Image (cartoon, grey):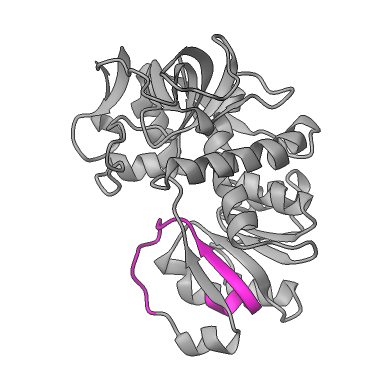
Amino acid sequence: MKAIVARAAGGPEVLALADVPAPVPGPGEVLIDVVAAGINRADVQQRRGFYPPPAGASDVMGLEVSGRIAGFGPNVTRPFSIGDKVVALLAGGGYAQQVAVPAGQVLRLPSGVDVVTAASLPEVAATVYSNLFMTAQLQPGETVLVHGGTGGIGVMAVQLAKAAGGRVIATAGSDEKVAMLTSYLGADAAINYRTRDFAEAVQEITGGQGANVILDVVGAKYLAQNVASLALYGRLVVIGLQGGATAELNLGALLAKRAAVIGTTLRARPTEEKSTIMDGVRDHVWPLIAAGTVKTIVDKTFPLAQAAAAHEYFDSGSHVGKVLLTL
């Protein structure tokens, strides 16, 4: 089958279309004919050589796909049929014509979403649902600070936090993106991090109370400002390291706020945990998408063979929402 491979670690130019062995579904797995695959920051880190796949996962990039079920391995107990339109959360292998994935990580499409657009959903929905609600235990009325508010994860986080009754503040890198966050996505306030110290802005917006929950994709670069932005008993959930992995933590400031810093990843979690998360997405996120409360935002699509161009565009940071590869 055709798949995108990285010929070396490096920039988008290392990606190329190649022939690779087709996957064979194992026990409890389904085989999916891929229609579209989402591009995520983890794919970029893997391309650069900084984020290898977990043991046993495909070396092919791609953590989420949409498509149609093409076959089954033994002992699949979930009620799927050949031809069902589905999305899947993957540990790898999405930039390809087919992928095999545990059935518990597969969901039928939410109502009203076409099969290409649906590829924008599984990774971001699972990431945001698991971190805001399962890990941070976000409660109605709490203030949430979302970094990278117009990226794939940010777009989902802003909308899910609002739907749960949260007060949402988001950061973005341009005035145009800031305006979109408040006018279209429903954020209560937005901050251009290029022109303002976001910690000072959060304190100003909240009247000195701070944010109860912070969802952070940046990491080390933002650690001090994030701690300064927290409310009493606040929870900082770090899910990405775009700004580095090592920073100095002022434990005194953390103790004074009785706050918590939590680090999580999704990709390497056991299948059982991912299945539980996807069940929660189906029960709590899909109805919001079907009702139009949460919007799906696809910025641009590229044919699979143009994966290098798609990564170049993704790396530019100009996108709002998701960038997809289509087959």
Q: Can residue 151 be seen in the rendering of this structure?
A: no
Q: Residue at x 28, y 36 (%)?
A: 56
Q: Which residue is painted at 72% across and 81% down in the image? A: 208
Above or below, 96 against 243 in this view is above
Number of residue marks: 0
Q: Answer left or right for 78 relative to 5.
A: right
Considering only vertical position in the picture, is 147 above or below 42?
below
Q: Is residue 255 above or below residue 18?
A: below
| Picture layout, residue 82 above or below residue 288 | above
**In the rendered view, does 11 fall on the left or right side of 8?**
right
Q: Is residue 110 visible?
A: yes
- Residue 302 drawn in magenta: no
Where does the magenta region start and end? 227-248
Q: Position of residue 306 (x, y in %)?
A: 37, 21
In the image, is 177 to the left or to the right of 241?
A: right
Q: Residue at left 77%, top 47%?
A: 183
Residue that lies at the very extreme toward the left in this rendered image:
8
Q: Quadrant of residue 198?
A: bottom right
Return the x and y of residue 37 as percentages of the image width and height.
Answer: 47, 26
